[in-house]
Amino acid sequence: MLPSHTPATIRAPFAQYAHGIEVPAGYRLLVCSGQLGARPDDTVPEDVEAQADLCFSNIAEILRSAGMSVDDLVRLNAFVTGREHLQGYMRARDRFVGARKPASTLMIVSGFSRPEFKVEVEALAAGKARP
């Protein structure tokens, strides 16, 4: 796991995340585009938590395709369309990250490309360089 930084001299995180994650020399970065809660058949669940689960499932697949895992997450950037979606997103996020604490940002936005989308998640990961 990458070194995290949450100094005792600043306010503790609001949830399960670190204020900073260090990426040492010799690591490669994977930048994941924002993932929306759409299934492969383009159907979209109504519930924000189910949409977030799909976002995280997509991110897990992208990580796997690069030979990485959730352990390699450095940062999550998430966007929801209303405060009422915060708790559902956070439940899905906490299941996905488990005990890991990547850096994390959550913002409320006015909407996405299609009105049925309620959440979008971007990810940054750092894995050991390949030989």
Image: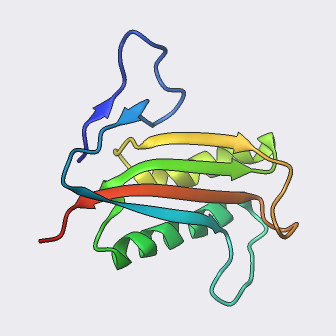
Q: Position of residue 52 (x, y in %)?
A: 62, 61
User: In front: 115, or 130?
Assistant: 130
Instruction: Give the quadrant of residue 67.
Output: bottom left
Task: Name the residue located 74 percent from the left edge and 48 percent from the top edge.
Answer: 85
Q: The C terminus appears in which quarter of the rendering?
A: bottom left
Q: List x then y, in percent, for residue 12.
A: 46, 19
Residue 48 picture quarter? bottom right
> Seen from this angle, which residue lies furthest front?
25
In the image, 1 versus 83, the foreground residue is: 1
Decide: is 58 above or below 49.
below
Q: Is residue 43 left or right of residue 121?
A: right
Furthest toward the bottom, the residue is: 41
Residue visible at 71% across and 58% down in the picture = 119
The percent position of residue 34, horizontal first and vertical second, equals: 61, 63
- Residue 68, horizontal then vertical, whole percent: 30, 67
Image point (32%, 65%), residue name = 69
Horizontal side of 63 relative to 81 (left or right) equals left
Q: Residue at x 59, y 70 (%)?
A: 54
Query: Relative to residue 72, is residue 62 drawn left or right?
Result: right
Give the image's coloring scheme.
Answer: rainbow
**Horizontal placement of 109 versus 78: left or right?**
right
Q: Nearer the viewer, residue 24 or 8?
A: 24
Q: Residue furthest top?
A: 9
